[in-house]
Amino acid sequence: MEFKSTRTEWDTLKKDTQERMKAAAPFVKEGKIVDQKDTVALLEAVIKPFDKVNIEGNNQKQADFLAKCLCQVDPKKIHDLHMVQSVLTLPEHLDVFEKGIAKKLDMSFSGPQAGRIAEFLREGKLELGAIHTYLELYGRYFVDLTPKVALVAATMADKDGNLFTGFSTEDTPAIVEATKFRQGIVIAQVNKIVDKLPRVDIPGDWVDFVIQSPKPFYIEPLFTRDPALITDAQVLKGMMAIKGIYGEYGVQSLNHGIGFDTAAIELLLPTYGEELGLKGKICSHFILNPHPTLIPAIETGWVQSVHSFGGELGMEDYVAARSDVFFVGPDGSMRSNRAFSQTAGHYAIDMFIGGTLQIDPYGNSSTATATRVAGFGGAPNMGCDAKGRRHSSGAWLKCGEEYGIKDQLFGPELHRGKRLVVQLAETFREKLAPGFVEELDAFALAKNANLAIEPVMIYGDDLTHIITEEGIAYLHKCRTMEERTAAIRGIAGFTEVGMKADPKETQRLRELGIIKTAADLGIDISRANRSMLAAKNVHNLVEWSHGLYNPPAKFRNW
Amino acid sequence: MALQVLNFKFKTEAPKTIAKKWSHLGVTGSGDLEVLMEQKELGGAVTAKVVTPVKGFDAVWEKMLGKFVNDCHVGDVSIEINDDNATPIVVYMRLRQALAEANAKEAE
């Protein structure tokens, strides 16, 4: 055998980048600083057609100035870009497709732009690779979706390109590492260029250009829920969750969804949770953004630790002053990190609990609607049983012990736990949209947008519990699909799914402990009202925080 | 939006009327409703009058009110509901709260 390589050149990526860097050289002032007025020219110098490009679009922090500038490049020079980015929030994220600058998209979540993605898909303006979960997309950054050019956002930089991303670090480390170590180019927009950074979050030799943007990067207070808008029905579901799940399993480590249902639970811990004697027994460790509604539980000593995917506007000072609880750097400010938080959320917590829009009779749950390609961000990473988990805990073991098909899967002797995956659903939401449907809208969306698979947020085999105002279904206890469907119908109220419930079967499932109503749990429905909440409005949260929480203007009404 | 008026009548096993002559709970605000309960000789039955802007949910109202009457063994009561787009759970909770209020043992 002759040991002969079939190629002789092994650094083409590096040479290609060097060439681009040469073209960009005229725009560099001191160190790595580029003037904001030269940004479009810089992009035209370093980006080539068909490149994979990442615009840092996080769940919260947005590289909005660079996104705007990318829309201004000449489509004759730069076209057919393949955008790889976790979140599409800004109009500019879609404008690049409208203008013919970009063609292909791989993403995780699209919130406000979801309708336009569906429209562009139909019109052929955009080709969709896949809708990923966050971890899945970050994983592919290191496999086959590595950006050639990354346009990121940071709070501050120095002239050598060192970045301070601080409270809002989010996706930046994952993007920059993937890009730079495959010889790519990293451009950062920063709120401010300074002589000395509070700390270095991204080392300067991983960053090629820094630009002070005309305005601080856009950030959305996505996780602020005004307690004044929590309803009595949410209080009822929260009470059932705390007694029937948190307390029942002794859930110590968990993630909460973004909605009002879990905000209600956070505000019930110091009141109802205290009354049940659960302090110290549940909710010690959170993987969670700094939710303002968690302040009362933190202040009353419920919470030992919180690691965050991202920051939350207005929570900076409070978080910095609670360094026993949050992950705070030597400079005194928090560092979020979505990749690590998602990893923790996948492997290291016992429960994911959050809201959904639709559940079908098999227990598949989705927030997809027929005309919006939105994705689910990180929910599926946490809303699933991590098959690679090998450490045990009380809640995890108990759920596994109750698993109805455990013996068929693992034999009768083996101990294996199970993640609690809980969906909170209202049988009817506002405008009387049903929370339970015979067929998910995900099917219509897959057809409309020509997707290979229906966008399901949480699959039926991962979902262990559903809570509605009618009761809790302990789905993992079911032994057959028939039983599971009956359990779902039994708590689906007056929806088309619930109307098909057989009252005798529902009664049998109650006797088996597969369905528990509020009465079965010993909860008095007439107590379920807003007076149970530890804070009734945003002002109360500020008071709980001793004035350290500084809510954005739109949440200030006093 | 035109309001519609729905009338129902229910009868359950071992019905019990309310302690007070009449009782009122809630407000007709967005997503909420007010409930009036009044003692009335109806041969053990319950009548319910629902005023709501929501169309097409007559069967749901009937099922839910029937469930309430059966679950709580209510009789000889006239119920009046003025609804503004409340979801079924809100209606059911308000009914339970109204009943608790109508049976509250306080000096009258």
Image (tube, coloured by chain):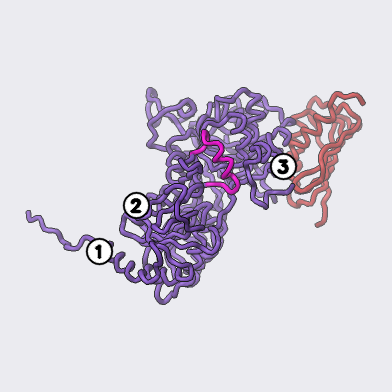
Chain colours: A purple, B red
Magenta segment = A311-327
If you read the primary sequence from the N terminus, does the residue marked by circle 2 or circle 1 appear first?
1
Name the chain under label 1: A
Name the residue beneath numbered marker 1.
Answer: A12
**Mark 2 or mark 3: which is in front?**
2
Name the residue beneath numbered marker 2.
Answer: A142
Disc 3 + disc 1, Cβ < 8 Å: no
Task: Label 2: state its secondary structure.
Answer: loop
Kind of residue indicated by mark 3: Pro
Disc 2 + disc 3, Cβ < 8 Å: no
State the residue lying farthest toward the bottom. A76
Residue A312 belongs to magenta span: yes
**Measured Cα–Cα span from mark 2 to mark 1:** 18 Å
Name the chain under label 3: B
Q: Residue at x 89, y 28 (%)?
A: B20
> In the visual, does A314 lie left or right of B95?
left
Name the residue beneath numbered marker 3.
Answer: B88
Task: Label 1: state its secondary structure.
Answer: helix
**Measured Cα–Cα span from mark 2 to mark 3:** 49 Å
Kind of residue indicated by mark 1: Thr
Disc 2 + disc 1, Cβ < 8 Å: no
Q: Position of residue A511 (x, y in %)?
A: 60, 24
Name the chain under label 2: A
Q: Identify whether A68 is placed above or below A390.
A: below
